[in-house]
Image (tube, helix red, strand yellow):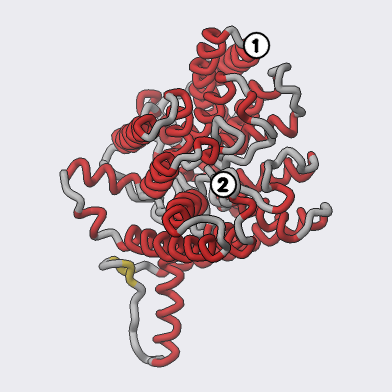
Amino acid sequence: MQISSRTKIVVHLCGFLVLLYSLSMIPPMLLALIDKDRSLFAFLTTFVCFSALGGFCWVTTRQENVQLKTQDGFIIIVLFWLLFSVISAMPLWLNDSLHISLADALFEGVSGITTTGASIFNNVSLLPRSILYYRAQLNFVGGLGVIVLAVAVLPLLGIGGMKLYQSEMPGPFKEERLTPRLADTSRNLWFTYLLLGLACTVAYMFAGMPWFDALCHGLSTVSLGGFSTRTESIGFFNSQPVELVAGVFSLLSGINFTLYFVAIIRRSIQPFRRNPELRFYFIVAAILVAIVALEVWRAGMYSPGESLVHAFFLTSSMLTDNGLATGDYAHWPTHTIVLLLSASFFGGCVGSTCGGLKMMRLLILLRQSRHEVHQLAHPRALISIKVGKTVMSDRVVRSVGSFFFLYAACTGLFIWLLNLMGYDLLTSFATVAACINNMGLGFGATASGFGGLSESAKYLMCAAMLLGRLEIYPVLILFSRTFWRS
């Protein structure tokens, strides 16, 4: 039976990406070797198996002068993220010292690679250093996406990568690039990402964090992933400087990474000052910080100064879907936590590593709503929808509206299914918000961790995390009959 050329190219690229991702097992494997940790076997087995499998598929399906179609890009993205999830879970499942089920390992792996940060471990502090580093690395690699890294070298394989790039990058403006050459774009994004990660790690060290904790938290913070080396998360350090660093870099990581690149090239802060999405993002953040600080102070939990610091940190973390937390956040007033859980649907800016709807979409919806009010008052007026000086096309406005509907519908479905499984409404809402927004902080029954969820609930939340990370469309489009006809 002959394999079609389209199937070959899908297998070829998936093989290459699996081979590339298997290399990420080397750093935690070396750390396990240094510490003489039993985790070495799990990382080594995963590396050998998947590097061999990926290499075999890549070499045996090589073709000349083949260009990706849009359909190929979507198929490869979804397939690879499924493979991504399985590979990420394997070192955890194969590790005898962790004693976790396949459902637990898959949940932890998916949570890490989708930068959700929800954990099934009850006591993270007892995990070996290799596992702690591996979890932070999962966040960091998943943050910008290994696809973007792969696209930087796809031209060397004779295969264009633009379709992969469009399918992977978040936001409504997927056709935009930083430079005319896609490989340059990907490298520039990764350079900016690494630079911000290094700056965050150094800042944590200056704030008093030990170097290993600083490294892991630096990787988790910049990726907005939320995995911590401590059970109490940032609250373990009981340090206002540490919370300020975490809050500041959460907000910085929620900014469109293309703005950093343009600002560096032009040696000017004008790209930040002129960006309407960024202004909206900071306005929303400031309003939320003020409300939360007032509420926790009114509840008598902290002094005015402490209230402001704690509110700034947790609001920044939950708004950007980072998921780092203070140890006592579950004891904050319920209405305040529900406000922050709702804010996690906002997310950060387009082109950042955050989850959620993204500020640009919310800004467009806000302008669209205002446009409808004006249109009702002046039916004959010709009013265009603008964001800054840019007029939004009907296509963009329609796509934003439909995405908002699909996101709300999927969220409602997941909440209903969890409620059907026996979880109360608050727990269901908080758990789904944590997973579909890739935010990672639960409430109610999941406030102390997600290990208590049933196996079926864990698999369901894995689906929610993947849908949130891929922004729904790449998954849903595979179920469309028109997609397979073309």
Residue 402 showing in the rendered view: no
Q: Picture coordinates of residue 152 (x, y %)?
A: 36, 30
Q: Amino acid at mark 1?
A: Arg
Q: In what element is the residue under mark 1?
A: loop
Q: Is residue 434 above or below residue 25?
A: below
Which residue position holds label 2? 438
The one nearer the camera, 98 or 274, is: 98
User: Which of the numbered marks, if any, corresponds to residue 38?
Assistant: 1
Tell me which corner region of the image, top left, top right, bottom left or bottom right, holds residue 188. Answer: top left
Point out the frontmost of discs 1 and 2: 1
Q: Is residue 214 above or below residue 314?
A: above
Q: Picture coordinates of residue 17 (x, y %)?
A: 51, 26
Is 423 displayed left or right of 74 in the figure?
right
Counting other residues with Cα less than 10 Å from the Cα at mark 2, is it few (<14), some (14-19), or many (20 or more)?
many
Looking at the rendered image, the quarter that the N terminus falls into is top right
Residue placed at 56% from the left, 47% from the top? 438
